[in-house]
Structures are given as structure tokens and as C-alpha cells.
Image (spheres, helix red, strand yellow):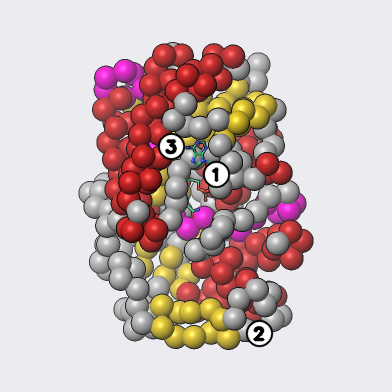
Amino acid sequence: MSKNILVVGGAGYIGSHTTLALAQAGYRPVIYDNFSTGHRDACFGDVLVEGDLADTAKLVQTLQEHSIDSVIHFAALIEAGASVHAPVPYFQNNVAGTLSLLEAMNTAGVKRLVFSSTAAVYGNVDGAALLSEDLPRAPINPYGDSKAMVETILERCAEAYGLQTIALRYFNASGADAQGRTGERHDPETHLIPLVIQAARGQRDLIKVNGTDYATPDGTCVRDYIHVSDLASGHVAAVTWLQKHDCAGKQAINLGTGTGASVREVIDAVRRISGKSFVVEEAPRREGDPATLVADAQRAHDILGWSAQHSDLDTIIRDAWRYAEAHL
Ligand SMILES: NC(=O)c1ccc[n+]([C@@H]2O[C@H](COP(=O)([O-])OP(=O)(O)OC[C@H]3O[C@@H](n4cnc5c(N)ncnc54)[C@H](O)[C@@H]3O)[C@@H](O)[C@H]2O)c1
């Protein structure tokens, strides 16, 4: 019998792709979203419940009414930069909101939770080594703090209540569904690839390269870009793993590729794939931007049997470009 999965934040970028992947894998996704940043036309669940994380009673009702087996929790405010100037909503939504969800899960007796964490929990790591899950959590902004706090809370809940939980630490989510059913539509947009695509489409005057003197091969920052459909399959793998290993416990697992691309490589790839030219401006470094952030992707492979399949830069940019041309 197909299992019902509550996808909290399922109307968002990564949640909508994951909902498609869950349905494809034979699960029955139930979306719970307040549409603060999500989109109604990106809901692909069997059921849609409009509600807020803070509404514990509605969460309990939803978990019970739909006989939910496992929860995947994407709902959060996601802008690291904005969180520095307005930390309270970040802690309110991301931390207090998650506590409300955990309370509801406890009341309804739902034990399995996959949580959207982030490479931002590693903070300002120096050097080019791959980032292993064994590194200490050392976030440098309230957004990263909020995710690190939730990871700690989940660990304590695993010990106290028998919660079975996996925190998936995503690197740079990018790309779009290859069939164009959903894609990246953040507002405001702060991620590099959609910003470069906006420049190529004439929707912004130029693209800024923040820092050209880093200790990287071409002097610009290197990041691990992971195709959103690979993230989606990582969630299916995580939820399936939790169901197979029916015992309390917690894991933190990176979802990345293990290789990085520089800002210049991204810009060159968008130029090549779009055939468009646009203005690129060199600008000073931004505070808090490490030179290189690339995942050690071994644990995801060893535990979940998962590895990225669609995350070469050209595939990511081709899918993102096609989605932008058709929908944005
Ligand atoms: N996009 C990335 O590169 C990236 C990287 C690392 C981690 N993450 C994490 O992945 C998750 C999803 O990110 P995304 O890019 O899809 O963001 P998104 O903004 O597109 O999606 C978030 C969804 O959650 C919903 N939501 C937010 N607060 C809610 C609340 N209080 N109640 C109910 N619904 C609520 C929004 O309406 C939206 O549909 C977030 O937790 C984010 O921190 C994202």
C-alpha cells in the first residue's frame, strides 16, 4: 500500500520537485503550505492543505486525517543575507515553527521526519577540503543558526521521543524539472544561476561577480551546484531509508556532488547555452563568503545509496534556462 507523506512547504522550489519524485516513486504526497513564498500552480500532491507551521492543531488534524506515515519538512525562510538584518522572523518561522510541527507529530504519533538543512551550518570554513558531516556546526548568520538549532532539537527528540530523523544538508540547489513542470521562482531571487539567467534574458542590467581574488583556480568563489531533481530523489531515498530502519535515531547527510563550479564557470555556461551576451561587472568580495564550499558526498552514497545523476553544470543550466524561457 502506498504510504502518505506530509510535505510541509511542498509548494516551494525544492518541495514541488520532491512531490513529483514522491508520486513517481509510488508515495502519496499531502502538501501543507501557507503560500508565503510557494506557488499554487507548483502543488503536485494528492491533497493540498493550506495552513501555517505555527498552527499545531491544524497540523495534528492533517497528520491524523490523512494517516501520515512520514513528514518531509521544507518550510522555512531561506535568505541568509536578510536574516542578518531581521533575525526574529527566521527564528520564529524556522525554529518555533519546527517545534510546532514536532509537537503535532508527537500528538499524532508520527515518528519519521526528513528535515531540510543546509551547508550553511558549516559556516565560514577555510580551505578547499570537502565538507564532511563530522565537522562542527558553526553557522555565521541567523538563517544558518536556525537550521543548526533545529538539527540539535531533532537530535534531542530522537533521544527523548524515539523520533527517526534525517537532516539533509543541501549544497546549492539549482536547475529545474526536465519536463518543465516546476522550477526556481524565488522572489526576491538571490541565487547565482537564476540571476545570471535573468541577465541573459535582459531582465537585469548586469551580473556582479563578488570577489575575483579568492584562492581558487580562476579567483572566483566555488560552490557545489546540485540539480533540484537530484535533491528530490535524495528525499525519496531518505524517507524510504527511515521506513526500512524502524528505530529511533538521527543522521545528518550532505546532498551535494563532491565537485564545484566557479562563478565564472557558471557565467560562461549560461552564455554558451543561451547564446546571449550580457554585462558582467567585477565587484569586491562580500563579507562571509568562503572561497570554496563543496560537499563530501560519500555518506549519502554509503547510507542512502544515493548519488547525484543530473548535476553536471550544463544539464543544470539547460534545464533552468528552458524553464525560465517558458515560464518567467
Ligand atoms: N534553495 C536552496 O538553495 C537551499 C539550500 C539549502 C537549504 N535549503 C532549504 O530547503 C528548504 C526549501 O527551500 P526552497 O528553496 O524550496 O524555498 P521556498 O521558499 O521555495 O519554499 C519554502 C516553502 O515553505 C512554505 N512555508 C514557509 N513558511 C511556512 C510556514 N510557516 N507554514 C507553512 N508553509 C511555509 C512556503 O510557502 C514555500 O512554499 C528550506 O528549508 C531551505 O532552508 C534551500
Q: Secondary structure at mark 1?
A: loop
Q: Residue at x 43, y 37 (%)?
A: 115
2 vs 1, front mark: 1
Q: Secondary structure at mark 3?
A: strand
Task: Locate residue 182 relative to residue 131 in the image: left or right.
Answer: right
Q: Which amino acid, by three-letter code, is at mark 2?
A: Ser
Q: What whole-number distance in Å separates the C-alpha atoms at marks 2 and 3?
A: 39 Å
Q: Which amino acid, by three-letter code, is at mark 3?
A: Phe
Quadrant containing the C terminus is bottom right
Q: Which residue lies under the disc numbered 1?
A: 36
Q: Quadrant of residue 49?
A: top right
Q: Residue at x 62, y 71 (%)?
A: 197
Crowding at mark 1 (Cα within 10 Å: few <14, some 14-19, many 20+)? few
Residue 59 has which mark? none
Magenta span includes 175: yes
Q: Residue at x 63, y 37 (%)?
A: 19
Task: Locate residue 110 relative to residue 31 in the image: left or right.
Answer: left
Q: Which residue lies under the disc numbered 3?
A: 115
Q: Are marks 2 and 3 in contact (CB under 8 Å)?
A: no
Beta carbon of the mark 1 residue lies under 8 A of ligand 1: yes
| Viewer-closest of 262 and 40 | 40
Q: Which amino acid, by three-letter code, is at mark 1?
A: Ser
